[in-house]
Amino acid sequence: MAATDLHYLSLDEVARRLKARKLSSVEATQAILDRIEKLDPTLRSYATVTPERALQDAARLDAETASGKSRGALHGVPIAVKDLCNTAGVPTAAGMAIHRKHLPAKDATVVARLRQAGAVILGKLQMTEGAYGLHHPTIEPPVNPWNAAYWTGVSSSGSGVATASGLCFASLGSDTGGSIRFPSTMNGLSGLKPTWGRVSRAGVFPLAESLDHVGPMCRSALDAALILGVIAGADPDDPTAAPRPVPDYAGSIGAGVKGRKLGVPTNLLGMDADSRRALDGAATTLKDAGAIPVEVELPELDEATLKWIPLCGLEAALAHEATFPSRRDDYGPDLAALIDLGRGLSGLELGKLQLVRARVKGEIERLLAPLDLLLMPVMGAATPSLAGMKAAGRTPQTTAARLRYTAPFDMSGHPTLTLPGGVTSDGVPVGFQIVGHAFDEADILAAGHAYQQATDWHLKRPPL
């Protein structure tokens, strides 16, 4: 990376340059806006860009810096948020045609906290319809910057593409079945799905409220720690946000993994050579850093993942009750089919789904009990091609197979950190996840940082 490649610096490095007054927020913001103007007509990662507001905010923050005021580690850093996070006076469509003109009066809590911490919001990032599996038919999906023939991941596709391409220094995504982890993996990022309840969902358009998680998508575990430290915590506007103290995630990120018990599964299914290589490499690197590998056997996850689909459908039906089916024609076929599935469930079927979810959570808790960390793939196969996905089709079985190693941790609510761990022969990233105990984000971030101190996969950038 050339010294002039400001757009590819880590959030931490940009923040340090801003603090030292070696760079101004206006300079950083204008550089990224110029790059968005140049590249995003092809990459299509943004739903809305707000250049005037961003530059005004940057100028105000530079004035605060000049007067000796600092709001913290994000002061003056340009970032962007997924387009389901409400932004006052700026359209928040959640990837839906029906909400294109929706102008929230109030920021989502996570957006308000980013602004309070001094982040400059560049705009809203494109996403699948309602945060489910496909983009609305009227939206051209974002393009994978590593190779346009490959998947960008869902539903935080714009967040993954923009952050990987140097169109923001970090972003927010959301994860209901894997939608922070898939686009982070497909775009070579470090993405954190926090514990359910660690981050407020107030002002965030839901797909399935008891499964939805909001978290950072960044270029390193350290960057993710910096963002999480700002957005985490109790919120009077969201009673499900846990009233727990927020640790100094960035301050403790150097804790390492020495003596930490690392679960390494022996019964993984559907693994290709690239995914296996990334997972084995991560296990070796973490062992060399002092972790103690422990072979474990995963519980059977496929039935649970199949049950994730109707459970998500039921909660999606609740989220869209005001507009579906009354405005069915405004919906794309994929989201409409999910909502129809949810609306068609009986009370008995709902009861069975809840029992399956309770069992999955209990099995994962039991698996994690003797461990500190659990190493997992994100998918058995590395980044899939668009042609391959089209050929495979979309059935409950193909969807469940793709979600096998992600959705169970949405059902259980455990935190996971996705990290880049290699590149395939076609030049696209492949990653893995580190799973932790509930509210132990500090541990998985420290493990991720230890891995990234010993490797350079997170420093690779797409050929743009």
Image (cartoon, helix red, strand yellow):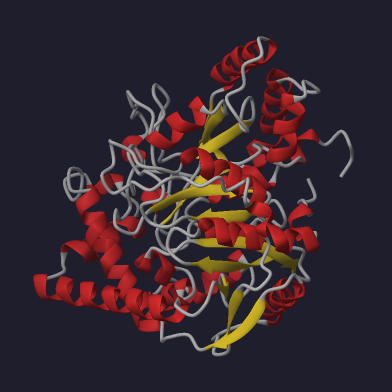
Task: Say whether residue 350 is visible.
Answer: yes
Residue 281 at x, y = what percent? 74, 75
Residue 238 at x, y = what percent? 28, 41
Identity of the residue drawn at 32% across and 23% down: 105
Among all residues in the image, which is located at the extreme front?
259
**Quarter location, residue 245:** top left
Residue 173 at x, y = what percent? 49, 48
Tell which of 248 and 335 is nearer to you: 248
Among all residues in the image, which is located at the extreme right?
2
**Quarter location, residue 13:** top right
**Quarter location, residue 148:** bottom right
Task: Say whether residue 141 is visible.
Answer: no
Report the quarter where the N terminus lies: top right
The number of callouts visible is 0
Q: Seen in the image, is 108 located left or right of residue 215?
A: left
In the picture shown, does residue 72 fall above or below 444? above
Tell which of 451 and 159 is nearer to you: 451
Identity of the residue drawn at 57% across and 17% down: 57
In the picture shown, does residue 327 fall above or below 277? above
Q: Seen in the image, is 53 located left or right of residue 31?
A: left
Report the quarter where the C terminus lies: top right
Residue 364 at x, y = what percent? 41, 77
Tell which of 462 and 449 is nearer to you: 449
In the picture shown, does residue 259 fall above or below 35? below
Identity of the residue drawn at 33% across and 46% down: 243
